Each structure stands twice: as C-alpha cells, then as structure tokens.
Image (spheres, rainbow, N blue to C red):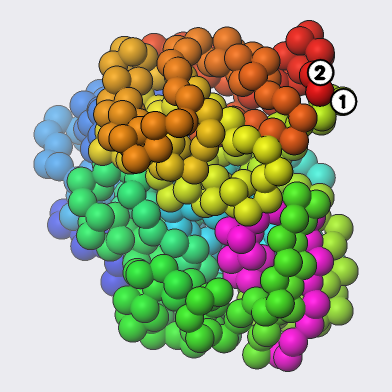
Amino acid sequence: MAALLQALEGQVRILDRHGNLDVSINAITDDSRAVSADSLFVAVKGERVDGHEFIPAAVKRGMVALVSQQPVSGVLLPLVRVDDSRKALGLLGSRFYGDPSSHIRMIGVTGTNGKTTTTYVCKALLEALRHPVGLIGTVVYQIGERTMPATHTTPGSLELQQLLAAMVAGGCTTAVMEVSSHALAQDRTSGCEYDVAVFSNLTQDHLDFHKTMEEYFQAKLRLFTGLKGGLKANKRAIINIDDRYGNRIVEACRVPVWTYALKAKADLCAEAVRLSLQGTIFTAATPFGNFPIESHLVGEHNIYNLLAAIGVALHEGATPAQICEAVAKIMNVPGRFERVIAGQPFTVAVDYAHTEDALVRLLATAQTLKTGRIITVFGCGGDRDRGKRPKMGEAAVRYSDVVILTSDNPRTEDPLSILEQVEVGVIEALRQRPHVQYRKVPDRREAIEEAVREAHSADMVLIAGKGHEDYQILGTQKVHFDDREVARDAIQRLGTRP
C-alpha cells in the first residue's frame, strides 16, 4: 500500500495515517459489496450514498486497509485519511493498474453536443495510421475487436483505469474518449494524463447537477487546464471558437492550441461547403494545407465534428490523403441522424438530440435539406435539467411543420407533468407559427407510429432524444425500446403512401 500512496504526492493531502502501510493490496474498490480479501477500500461520499457509512460492511468482507476522507474510529486496520478521497480514488486506481494513461496516447473530447460523433471519427482516422485504437463513450466501450455496452459516457474512476489498462494490455496505442462534465467535476479522470483535448461546444444541459452555466463551464475547463504539466510532451488543445466559450478556453490553455470554426477565422476551417441528404462535401483548410473532404455524415453540425477530428488526426501524424480516405469510409454513427430505411418514400431519421442546441442543429439541418414537411417526435428526460424543457418545445415548433410531443425516459417523474413543462414553450412558439400542427402522444411507440402514419412522400420524420439507446426508463425500471426498431416496424405495418 505504501507504494500506492506515492501516487497522491502533490495531488491529495494526507491528513492522518496509522497502522502497517506496507500491507499487500490485491484489489481496490469504493464499493463495499465488491470488497474481498486483501482489498483496499476507499470511502467516497457520493451524490446519493456515503461510502463512509459502509466501512463496517467492508471490514466484515475482509478489507485489509482503508482510505477515508472523514475521521474513523474503531477501525484497527491500516488507515489513511485524506482531504479528498474521490480524487484519491482515481490516483490510487491509476497506480494500482500500472498508470495506463502514461503508456498510451490519450485523446479527450468534451462539450455538450458532438462528443460521440467526434470520437467515432477520431477513431476511424487514427486507425488509418494503423494504430490500434480504444474507444470510451456514450454508446460503447471498445478494446480492439471487443465491444462492451457503455455504463456511463465516462465511467467511474476504477472502471476507467481498468479499461485503459486493458487497452494497453491489448496492444492499443491510443485511447479516444468522451469526457463528460460530471466526470470532470467528480474527478473520475483523476490519474489520467491527456495528450490532446477537444472542445466542441457548451449549451444548456445538466443544470440539475451543475446549477449554473458558469459551474458547467468550469467543469469542462478542467480538461484543458489539466493539460499543463505531467510527464508527456507534444500536447495540444483543439477548440471550437464559433462557440462563445471557446475563446475563454483558448486563453486558459498553457499548451499549443489549434482552433476550428465555420464562421470565425481559425486554424481549421471548411470552405466551399455542399450539404445534401447523401452527405457533406467541403474543402478543409488546415495548418497542413487545403484538401477535399467527402463524408456520408449529414448536416453543418457534422462539419464541426469532422474539423475537430481532422485536427486530432493531423496532430497525431496523419496525412491529408489518409484523412480523406478514412473519412469517406465512415457511413454513420449510431443514433446520430441514423436513417431508417424500410422502403418508404419519405425520410425517417433517429437522432440523440436531447438539448435545445442539439435539437436546433438537427432541425436546422433538416430545413436546409427538406423537400416536404418536417415531422418532429421528441420528449424530455425525467429527473434531469427542467429548465431546457420549454426551450426545446419552442425550438421544435420554430423549425417543424408537425410536432408530436411524447415521453423520453421519464424515470421517476410523471410523464404528463414533463409534457406540460415542454408544452409551455410549444404554446409560446405557436403564437408566431400558428400553422404548425401540434399534438401530445405520451406513449412513445404510439407517437412514432402516428408520425409514420402522418408522413407522405418527400416528408422528413425526425425522432429525437434517444438515438442509439435501446431502452426506456420508466420509474426505476429499464425496458427494451429502440426508436429505430419501432420506426421500422411502423413503416412495415402501416405501409407506404404517395
């Protein structure tokens, strides 16, 4: 254990220690239920439960040492008290698993929207260099050919270190990961040293957790201020300066920066842009010259994602030719404007857009590509930021011809109460656009079927909010539900209309 404690030096203050700290540690956990013989238990106070309350249970299960943030009495085992046990958990976990981030290139992508697409594109471009790349994100965790369902956008400290260690053991040379604001605020990435950090954008979300936009921003900023120092060289930040928070991050960075933008003057830009339902064509203007990009990804928002990933790839040594070839092979990203094709004469797309900004981006893209009506099906998740609900309702009416309001993941909230809060924005927007058809269909399956029934040739049905998710959370129960499956079934059962 004494060797593990060295990882805390200069990071976490040790307030007290007693007992034989040379005890052998064969496992480390912050879950008392996972304690086994020779385990080190780290007591962390969480949002809902306090790990300090489970110290007696950990003793009974055979823990041999304890790290605590609070004073503990009656424990005769080796004990270390620190000023921040949550941060200590990541540092100790990193050292226990061999400091994996020091043996692998670490690419971190943060922002409200675009993280998943950017990481998928980064992975594809870096694999063009024949680099084995691991992926950690909202949809899945990937280590070589092995794919696991994601538990969180960014997993807990110990799970993250285990994944990185598995990547190192599996021969990966690079890890590309989404870094959530929750993870940064909760020090889940403690013990990780990043080589490249990407900022996509910052819009309202998660204010049930962060309380204010400034607090939300400060959490994101930690990824970039944390680039300074450490043992690694050749670091870089890649920042979207079309976003109003981008320049604040540039000013705070103490490592080289590349900016990207479509409107502002930046290091990476897109010129001669052509958008269609089949994809996107533009010229990438970069520090390594200009070169043509042809992508199957749809919409202006994906140009931002592509520019960010191109910046990462160039920094990591890819050539323009390798980038062009790799981008052209990317067909889609799960749940991101994912087309559902079942023989119908109208477009159906499923998208993860679950914030006002993401919904606006999705619908604005649809507006530029539409040849008929836009029919939007969406809802808002329960037990999450309530302030964005009326804003999303307003956005849907502003850009759609038909709006069908339905349940998302209501969780423990009353679904009808959520719809009423979204409806406030809908009703306000209808004053300016009274021609928009609007209805509430609380059952999500029925709402999707109604949208398919409503659609005719050249219309576009957008099913927003859940994207890649194959479940719905009702109360505390998770039940199977996949927007793509439901839409395909509805098209096949209802048939097609001219």
Q: Residues at badges 2 and 1 in contact (C-beta under 8 Å)?
A: yes
Tell me the residue that label 1 is attached to. 343
Amino acid type, residue under disc 1 in the picture:
Gly
Is residue 350 at least partly visible in the picture? no
Under tag 2, what secondary structure? loop
Residue at the spot 45% in from the left edge and 58% down from the top edge: 111
Q: Is residue 301 magenta?
A: yes
Residue 154 place in picture, x, y as percent: 49, 47
Comparing 395 with 88, the one in front is 395
**Residue 257 seen in this snapshot:** yes
Kindly identify the residue that appears in the image at 86 percent across and 79 percent down.
321
Image quadrant in which you'd find residue 485 = top right
Horizontal arrangement in the rendering, residue 422 relative to residue 291 (left or right): left
Q: Which residue is mark 2?
A: 496
Judged from the image, the secondary structure of the residue bearing numbered disc 1 is loop
Task: Identify the residue shown where x is 73% and y is 91%.
Answer: 289
Q: Is residue 285 left or right of residue 411?
A: right
Residue range of the region highlighted in magenta in the rendering? 288-310
The tag earlier along the polypeptide, 2 or 1, is 1
Eye-nearest disc, 2 or 1: 2
Q: Position of residue 361 (x, y in %)?
A: 52, 51
